[in-house]
Image (cartoon, grey):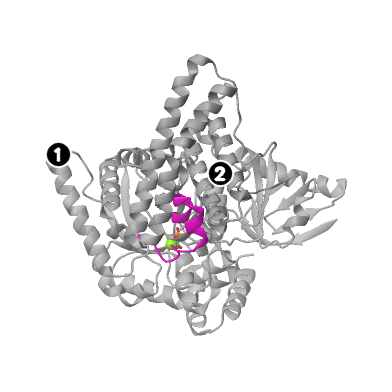
Amino acid sequence: MKKIKGVKISPGVVSGPVFYFERVKISVPGHFIGDEDFDSEIERFNTAVQKSKDELTQVRDLVLDHLDEEHARIIDVQLLAIQDEDMIKAVRELMLREKKNVTWAYFEVMDNYEKLLLKTYSKFFKERTSDLKDIKKRVIHHLSPKKDILQPEILEPSIIIAEKVSPSDLIHIDHKLMLGIITRYGGVDSHAGILARAFRVPYISNIEVIDELASCKEIILDADNGTILLDFTDDIKASYKSRIRDFRRHRGKIISGKVANSTKDGTPYHIYINAGFVDEVKAMDPALIQGIGLFRTEFLCIERNSIPGEDEQFKAYRNVLKKMKGLPVVFRVFDFGRDKLLAMLDIELLQEDHLFDEWGGIGFLLDNPAILKAQLRALLRASVYGNTQIMLPLVMFDEEVILTKNMLEAIKMELRKAGIPFSDNIKLGAMIETSSVLDELDELAKHVDFFSIGTNDLALYLIGSGRALDLTKNYYHPKIFQAIDKIVKAGKKAGIPVDVCGEMASDPYALIGLTALGIRSISVSSSALTAVSDEVSKLDVKKCSELADTILSTDNALAIYSILKKFHQDNLE
Ligand code: PEP
Ligand code: MG
């Protein structure tokens, strides 16, 4: 038997065959159509081309606003190619000749173009194949029912093996076929990791031997312990049987009892849930939980590859609020930072350039007021269906909050005039997750009702490591704890609550440190909820608080880690 160690990204235990995931490998099934279906198929095709054109125009405007003409030209090329007369003629001819569906015909025609370009000696033409791939994906996305989108040819439920996976891969692969995930690259805080936890798919990364795994017939993925087993005996497999069965059985359940609302010594403690999909919220039982502390609205965009309009957003927010039956729901306005925006734009050429690494948050939305306005209108309209709160991501300056509040007031006036009801009791919060805002906390606190600490990005800003890497050790970095101390004190001074919604809060050792510094409210992914609830109910707040000075005066992450681990062993195990 061989055991391989990796970094645990999402818990769970599964066994099964492997599937080596390559993005380009997508299947588009062909089937015969009758003459009477020809016109409706062409109609579908025209609509899909038009929708793709609209999306690309939206992307082009964004790129032009934030980058330059040169990059906007990439989109221009795609806009031209997507409506190319010869290509449209070729699709019609192939459909007529073979009497097959339009999705299949379009895929075949585009595939042939790609092959032709690859045969040329020109670097310029070879590079255009990326454009064709992007266009093809976009049009087929609009031609296919949701589940067919760019699905790789996974024939049976399998453990996905890949160099890396993007948030949009995770959304578009059929979840019934995705038993688990193993990648070479990818971190705990990466958005793909966040999604894997939301979907309850066991996931391990930092695995060097991807190729070796790809040739295995069957493996055991024990993500709880960060290990992969290969070449195992029947006895070993049998020893895992009950854990695998339990995982499968409880996978759909978020929590079986009530979430803890106080620590061992009776100190009140809030544990909320991080979510990003309406379906995820549907699985939650409002009688057992306390509410949603972070709803990542941008995931609604990744799901459909574009920004939904006001009405579609309104319906999504209303569904979430109705399901939560009056429990608080903190909707974070779109945070198109980094891989989240890239996943949505779905333009391979732009992704390779890492052009959008620093682009996101409320600053981006204020630069694109039409997007922000539609979202705030949708949120205000939905607010009458529950306890709505709004949160702004990646705040850098207090002016950003002031400008957003002005916009909110203007929208309220519009709604009042139009006789559209909204709640007048919506709390507005700022995410504290950039280094620049740490110097503005007192000023900022005057304009918001709460602070929420985004430790995933805060670690990125303060320590500088990429989110796609393993960030576990960053949770214990002295700079993070010092920043948290500063934020908690600023919140206390201003009399506003401070919570933590980054992944750090679900780490049992880091949780002790957060509690020591005065945190009494956290928001964690649904897959971590049961474990975190258990940990909180074992905490003794007074004892934790005695650690505060030691944590703040220790100047290296490893030493802080050891202190917290020892405390955990002595008091909670
Ligand atoms: C964070 O940065 O900690 C956070 C909660 O937001 P996201 O992970 O969506 O950037
Ligand atoms: Mg963030």
Residue 33 within the magenta-colored segment of the rendering: no
User: In this orientation, which residue lies closer to the viewer: 10 or 141?
Assistant: 141
Give the label on residue 494, or none: none
Q: Residue at x 75, y 56 (%)?
A: 211
Q: Which residues are magenta?
A: 341-361
Q: Residue at label 1?
A: 418
Secondary structure of the residue carrying numbered label 1: helix
| Residue 135: x %, y % from top left | 48, 44
User: In this orientation, which residue lies closer to the viewer: 65 or 223?
Assistant: 65
**Is residue 306 positioned above or below 562 on the image?**
above
- Of badges 1 and 2, nearer the viewer stands 1
Q: Amino acid at mark 2?
A: Ser
| Residue 98: x %, y % from top left | 59, 23
Q: Residues within 10 Å of mark 1 (few under 14, many from 20)?
A: few
Whether residues under marks 1 and 2 lie with C-beta atoms below 8 angstroms apart, the answer is no
Secondary structure of the residue carrying numbered label 2: loop
Q: Residue at label 2?
A: 256
Using the rendered view, name the quadrant where residue 403 is placed: bottom left
Whether residue 99 is visible here, answered yes or no, is yes
| Residue 190: x %, y % from top left | 53, 59
* Residues at marks 1 and 2, CA–CA distance in whole angstroms: 44 Å
Q: In the rendered image, which quarter contains the C terminus?
A: bottom right
Q: Residue at x 53, y 72 (%)?
A: 465
Q: Residue at x 57, y 61 (%)?
A: 188
Q: Is residue 314 left or right of residue 38?
A: left
| Residue 468: x %, y % from top left | 55, 63
**Is residue 470 positioned above or below 271 on the image?**
below
